[in-house]
Image (cartoon, rainbow, N blue to C red):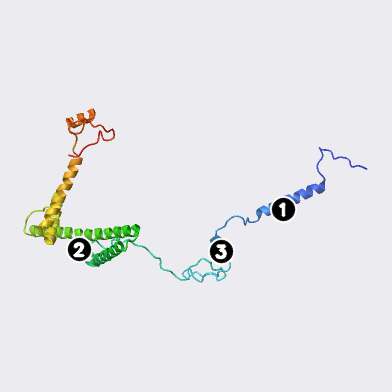
């Protein structure tokens, strides 16, 4: 015999209502339970668990006792390892200021090492040229020799300039102690002083011929710079526009590629 459908307007049976009420009570109980999925600080958990373990202090001035039941953390420092701190002596005030004369005296052996390196490179280069070594080897030796010679020349120049400036500084200090006013060197005066020191060094090492050669070389260099910076005259500009040579009155150039080329004077 088929069951009749329950009317829609009627209330559910008593058994179903009791089951639904029991499920709601279970949900309320589950909501009241602590949610362990939420993060809780370790200090709070330890404080809650240790409240009953720590005995009450005899006096408020007595030291606080820590329970031995608390597990020791894995992340702890058993041995204190000193921390390595890097310091740059250029920016550390403990090092003090740089004294160039003292630095030169302390590291004067570097120049001797560079001179020895240059001598060995010269010998290696001569041997390579004699044995007709590959041009890559000869070229690398030439570059290394040029670098060594440049370093030696720079050290020599720095020492010469430092001695010249130190001499002027001592003379100025003596003049101030004698009662004269302060004097400050200009850039042009410093340039002339260093140039004079250079020529004096050349005269002491190579004589007047070396000084004369250096002066002629310097004059030639200055003349070349002035010649390159020299503008064209109006006659030369007119000649270029008409297709003639830079002299202005010469015959016009027939070649198309060299028609406007500037000739050396």
What whole-number distance in Å separates the C-alpha atoms at marks 2 and 1? 90 Å
Q: Which residue in the structure is indicated by mark 1? A: 26
Q: Examine the rendered structure and indicate whether residue 39 appears above or below residue 66.
A: above
Furthest toward the top, the residue is 242
**Mark 3 and mark 1: span between their CA atoms?**
30 Å
Marks 3, 2: nearer the viewer: 2
- Residue 250, x across and y down, in percent: 18, 31
Residue drawn at (75%, 49%) of the image: 21
Image point (82%, 47%), residue name? 14
Across and down, in percent, residue 173 comes to 11, 59
**If the image is split into quadrants, where does the N terminus sit?**
top right
Which labelled disc corresponds to residue 101? Answer: 2
Depth check, front residue: 264 or 1: 264
The answer to whether mark 2 and mark 1 are in CB contact below 8 A is no
Q: Which residue is mark 3?
A: 46
Q: Residues within 10 Å of mark 1 (few under 14, many from 20)?
A: few
Q: Secondary structure at mark 2?
A: helix
Q: Earlier in the sequence, mark 3 or mark 1?
A: 1
Q: Residue 124 placed where, x, y %?
A: 29, 64
Q: Nearer the viewer, residue 106 or 132?
A: 132
Secondary element under disc 3, as helix, strand or loop, is helix
Residues packed near mark 3 inside 10 Å, few (<14), some (14 to 19) or many (20 plus): few
* Label 1 element class: helix
Mark 3–mark 2 contact, CB under 8 Å? no
The quarter of the rendered structure image containing the C terminus is top left
Cα–Cα gap, marks 3 and 2: 66 Å
């Amino acid at each position: 015999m088929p069951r009749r459908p329950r009317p829609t307007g009627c209330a559910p049976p008593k058994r179903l209502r009791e089951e639904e009420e029991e499920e709601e009570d279970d949900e309320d109980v589950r909501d009241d339970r602590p949610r362990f999925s939420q993060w809780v600080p370790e200090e709070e958990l330890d404080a809650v668990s240790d409240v009953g373990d720590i005995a009450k202090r005899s006096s408020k001035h007595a030291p606080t006792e820590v329970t031995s039941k608390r597990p020791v953390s894995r992340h702890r420092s058993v041995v204190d390892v000193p921390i390595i701190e890097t310091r740059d002596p250029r920016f550390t005030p403990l090092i003090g200021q740089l004294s160039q004369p003292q630095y030169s005296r302390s590291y004067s052996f570097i120049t001797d090492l560079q001179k020895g390196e240059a001598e060995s490179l010269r010998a290696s280069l001569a041997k390579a040229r004699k044995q007709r070594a590959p041009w890559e080897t000869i070229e690398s030796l030439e570059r290394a020799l040029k670098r060594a010679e440049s370093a030696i020349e720079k050290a020599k120049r720095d020492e010469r300039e430092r001695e010249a400036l130190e001499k002027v500084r001592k003379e100025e200090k003596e003049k101030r102690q004698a009662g004269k006013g302060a004097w400050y060197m200009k850039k042009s005066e410093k340039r002339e002083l260093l140039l004079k020191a250079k020529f004096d060094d050349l005269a002491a090492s190579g004589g007047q011929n070396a000084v004369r050669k250096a002066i002629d070389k310097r004059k030639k260099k200055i003349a070349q710079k002035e010649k390159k910076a020299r503008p064209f005259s109006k006659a030369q500009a007119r000649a270029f526009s008409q297709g003639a040579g830079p002299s202005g009155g010469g015959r016009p150039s027939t070649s198309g590629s060299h028609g406007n080329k500037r000739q050396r004077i």
